[in-house]
Every structure is written in structure tokens, then in C-alpha cells.
Image (cartoon, coloured by chain):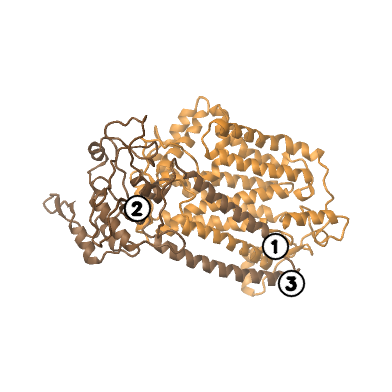
Chain colours: A orange, B brown
Amino acid sequence: MSDHEYTPTSKFGKWFNDRLPLLTLANHLTDYPTPKNLNYWWTFGGILTFCLITQIVTGLTLAMHYIAHADMAFESVEHIMRDVNYGWLIRYIHSNGASMFFLAVYIHIFRSLFYGSYKSPREIIWIIGIIIYLLMMASAFMGYVLPWGQMSFWGATVITNLFSAIPFVGEGIVNWLWGGYSVDNPTLTRFFTLHYLLPFLILGLVVLHIWALHVPGNNNPIGIDIKKPSKDTVPFHPYIVIKDGFALLMFMIIFAFFIFYSPNILGHADNYIEANPMVTPAHIVPEWYLLPFYAILRSIPDKLLGVVAMLSAILILAALPWLDTSKIRSAVFRPLYKQFYWILVADVLILGYVGAMPAEGLYLLVARVATAYYFLHFLLILPVLGFKEKTLPVPLSITESVLGGSPNLATAKNKESFDK
Amino acid sequence: MKNLIKLLSIITLICFTTAQSNSAEIAKFLKTDWSFKGVFGKFDRGSLQRGYQVYTEVCSSCHSMKYLSYRNLGEKGGPEFSEAEVKAIAASFEVTDGPNADGEMFTRPAKLSDKFVKPYENIKAAEAANGGAYPPDMSVLVKARGGGVDYVYSLLQGYEDAPSGVNLDEGVHYNKYMYGNKIKMASPLSEGIVEYGDGTEATVEQMSKDVTTFLMWAAEPHLEARHQMGFKAIVYLIILTILVYLSMKKIWSRIEPEV
């Protein structure tokens, strides 16, 4: 938090602020000292906030016209697309917005992995982030069920059936989730309710996420602790606001391109076929953003262990601050970690690719190797690397690193080579 | 900055290529130039009107289009029949309405607000009349098939004699673009099966193109509005982005020359 006390200038302002310090909060948010060397990877926090608000606003509008009933859901979506004023626009923003949201969150997470933003003293921010990510996946999955197309129905069937892997009580839990003996109207109505609820939980967690961030302040590309405020920092407004705004606009151009010119490219054609419990689609595939985890699930021959592996793949991230034993945050000064980082990125992309392919032959083999490597990275490579790796000398301040006037000329150059 | 552009463009590229490879099917689809593709893509009005004719005279005897209303035929961005024409089209269909004051159902000519009349009462009746296969509703058909318009366009022209070694059951036909090559629908189009009022020659290729265009409009009735708005929105965003970029440069120059 900013160190100086804030006093409103007007009398009314002071009176109000003494009773509810909203002005102090506003002052904190504008003055908030931010490292001046943040690069564009840091703009995705703001972009994600935009995504969340966009999803909530368009979602509320859609909910005014959508009918959560197995016999009417598909038709009501067509009603939105055809007869509601700009309904097509709102729906396409919402459906593509989910993809854009995940695109941004993956960049945000991988930025954190590169620069060690999850390390002390930012563990709580990181863990809240993981919870947000989990809720996002739950939300997105349930949202995909609502149009009640073939992929909605069969995706819901496959995913809810995962719970049947739990010994003894599995079947009971699945029936309880469905509200019956198969995915049907009760499933749809409860999914709609939860799909409506979860984004507001996410919103609350985002507030906590930002609050927790504002205690130690932002990490930065060289990953050192900085004095705040100092010549290493700039006030959030206008410097970061305008930079985030610029990045957001670039993001919106891509977003707009999807909405207006390829609105269905990220979805599956089968979801324009109304749900039919009698006909199973040839390939049941989840949305692209869930594919890496789907690949992990399918790479394990045993159903229960597959589910455990899939969940562990996400939950392992929560333990990351303790699995990574290195004291150095930024990969800029960790030559070995940097290489393993890019291997992990490639590994996850490969998992995503094989997740979209049928689980057989070479694809299955690749999925198994990639799954094994994923866990190896977190459980073995990271803990050992912290002890073994010879790190590069870290500059004492941002100014020093930027000017390069230090014993760390080489590292300053190194940093630049990543930036450019 | 450069990184951001690089990353975003790579991601866009990946999205497009994977989406394209996902929709790759057994045989390469026939290509034709669709007037509605691209940033300024619009429907060919004549093609839509001819496509509607093919739909009514050929497809509609088995395929329903339950999400469309007759009024849609006169709306902007569609076939844009005149109001009198649409009223005449609607009036040529009979719909069941009611109950009236006596509690009786009655039939009357369709009005603009009525949905397209279905060929069968329900799915079971449709299956019974078509050898057990349900002719799918055509309202969003092109969006419900991998390959979209190219697939439908190809399928209509993809009927062939079965190659030797392929055994077809009674009432099953060979189509090289169909998933598994076996289709219950007999080749629906043949030279001159409809007679176009505007003098266009009704070849199978022409009819396929017209009816597919019509189906695209049926699935995306606001496509033209979407393309127009998209162009405006993106131009607006680009101008705003440039302005914000310049402002950012100016603001950051107080701190350091390079952002």
C-alpha cells in the first residue's frame, strides 16, 4: 500500500472519507507505485478484468432471453440469434469471449511462470489465481452445455461421468449431479444456475487477487524486490493505465476479428445440432482450452487414475511456490530454468494438440510421454534445479539493470534479448 | 511490444490452422466463389431467391426449416422479396391454427409471422417416410457440418455409382463427400428439376450453389449486418489504438524516452 496518508481537499470529501474511505481507495489505485520496467506480458491482468466484465454483461443480457429447458434451450438460442435485437452480436461476443478469456489467462499464467511471480511473498495471489482458473474452467464447461447442442449434451455426459470413477460412491454422486439417471432437464437447469453464479464468485476472488497483489506490489521482469515508491516505480495512473489500455485495444482488435468474421471457428459444428440422447457424435471433444487436461485424462488407462492425474495436473500448480526451490524469481537470470520453461510450454501445446486427436496409436504414445514430462517438470526438475542451477548475477535495482551501468552488463543484455 | 504482436499473430495463426485441419474431411470439397465470404461479403440477392425456389420445390418436401418465418424472406440482408411477394408466398401454405371460439382447430393460409410449414408432423413421421433416416432440419444445417457451405455444396454434387467392392443396401446411395460415403438421401438435384424465373440455367452446379447460399443465409440471417458492423468496429478500434499509442508515447516520455 502507498505509504503516505491521503486527505481529501474538499470538506465534503473529508467528511465522507472519514466515514467510508472510498477516496483513499481511489487515491491508492491511481498512485499505486508500479515497477516501471513492466513489459507487455504484464498487461494481461487488465485484459482479463475486461474479459470478465464483458462475459458478465453479455451473459446477463443473454440470460434475459435464454430459456433453461431441455425442450426449449436450443430454440431460445436460435431466437437470440435471429429475433433479438443484436442478439447475434451479444451471443458471439459471449461465446468467443470465453475463448479470448482463456487465451489471456494462459498468457497470464505462463508470464507468472517465466518471471517467478508465484514466489514469496506472492504465494497467496498465486493460489487465488489457481482457484479463479478452476472456477473459470467450471464456468466455461457449464456455459458450453447451455445451448443444448450435441457437444453440449455429450460433453456434459463425459465430464460428469468422470465422477463415477470415485470408488463406492461414484455412481451415486453422478446421479446426484445429474438430478436423475442421465443428463437431462434437471442437469441443464442446475448448470444454468451455477453458470450464473460462478462468474460472481470469480469477480469476488479477482478483488482478493488484486488486493493481495497490492500488498507486496507487482513483480517485474528482473524479479527483484524494489523500494516503493522510488525512481524504479511509476504511479499506476496514467503510466500503466495508458499502457494497459493500448494493449487491451490490440487485444480487442483480434477479439473483434473473431466475433465479426469467424464467430464459429473456435466452436464445434456438432453444437449446431440439437442434443439427441440417442445419437452419439463420432468424436466428443471439449473446447480447445481444456484439451491439454483432456489429453492427460485419456493418457492413463485406468479411469480413476486418469481423473486423479487430470486434477493433479491443475492442483500441482498450487504447490508451485514450494516446488520451485530457487531463490531467484526471474528466468532472465536462470539460464537452465529458461530452457525448461520453453520445454514446458511446448509440452503443454503438444498435450493440447493430441487432446484434439483420437486417443490411439502414436497420439496416445505422445500423450503419455507429454503427461509424464508435465509431472516430471514440477515434481523433479523444478525442486532439483533450485539447488543445482548456476544463476546469473542479479542487478540491485531496475534503474541499474536498464542503464546497464553495473557489473551486470551481460545480464542487462540478456534481458533485452528476451524483450526484443 | 514486438513480442506481443508476434505472440498474438502466432496464436491467431494456430487457431485458424487447427480449425481448418479439424474440418478437413475425407475427400477435398469442391470450391466455388461464395459472394458472402470476406470482410465485405454480401449475399447474392438473385442466388438467394433462386435458392429459396430450389428449397421450396425440392428440399422442403422432406426437410423442415423450423426456425425461419415467412417474414424473414422479405427482411433486409436476405432474399429481399417484396412485401407483396412474401405475402403471396406465405398465403400459398396452409397452417393449422386455433382453437377458435368453438374450441375447434382450423386451417388458414399462412401469414408473414408464421414459421415455415414443416413437411412432417414430427421426427417419427419423417423417419417413417424416409426409410428410417430423419432428414435434418435445415435452419442451421450449414453451421452444423464440418466444412460448412463447401461441404453442402459438394455433397449435392457428390453422387456417384458405388465403386466395386462397396455394397449398398436398399435405399442407400453412394456419395463421395458423405461421412462413410453412404447416404439415405437420393440425389436430390437433376438438370432442370426447377425452372428459374430469371432465366438462369438450372444446372446441378447452379442449383447447388443457389440453395447452399440460401442455407447460409438461413443459418446466419444477420451475416451482412455482421460484416458491415465488423468493418466499422475494427477501423474504429485501429484508429483509437493509434491515438492511444501516441498518447502513451507522450506520457512515458516524461519518464524515459523508450517504453
Q: Element at badge 3?
A: loop
Which residue was labeled with disc 1? A32
User: Which amino acid does the dot numbered 3 rest on?
Assistant: Arg
Q: Position of residue B136 (x, y in %)?
A: 31, 44
Up-down relation of residue B152 to residue A406 (above or below)? above
Which residue sits at x=65%, y=57%? B4
Q: Quadrant of residue A337?
A: top right
Between marks 3 and 1 in the image, the one whose residue lies nearer the viewer: 3
Which residue was labeled with disc 2? B212
- The Cα–Cα distance between marks 3 and 1, rounded to whole angstroms, is 18 Å
User: Which amino acid does the dot numbered 2 rest on?
Assistant: Thr
Is residue B186 visible in this depiction of the protein?
yes
Q: Element at badge 2?
A: helix
> Which chain hosts label 3?
B
User: Which amino acid does the dot numbered 1 rest on?
Assistant: Tyr
Which residue sits at x=81%, y=38%? A387
Up-down relation of residue A160 to residue B244 (above or below)? above
Quadrant location, the C terminus of chain A:
bottom right
Q: Position of residue B120 (x, y in %)?
A: 23, 44
Q: Quadrant of residue B121?
A: top left
Which residue was labeled with disc 3? B254
- The Cα–Cα distance between marks 1 and 2, rounded to whole angstroms, is 57 Å
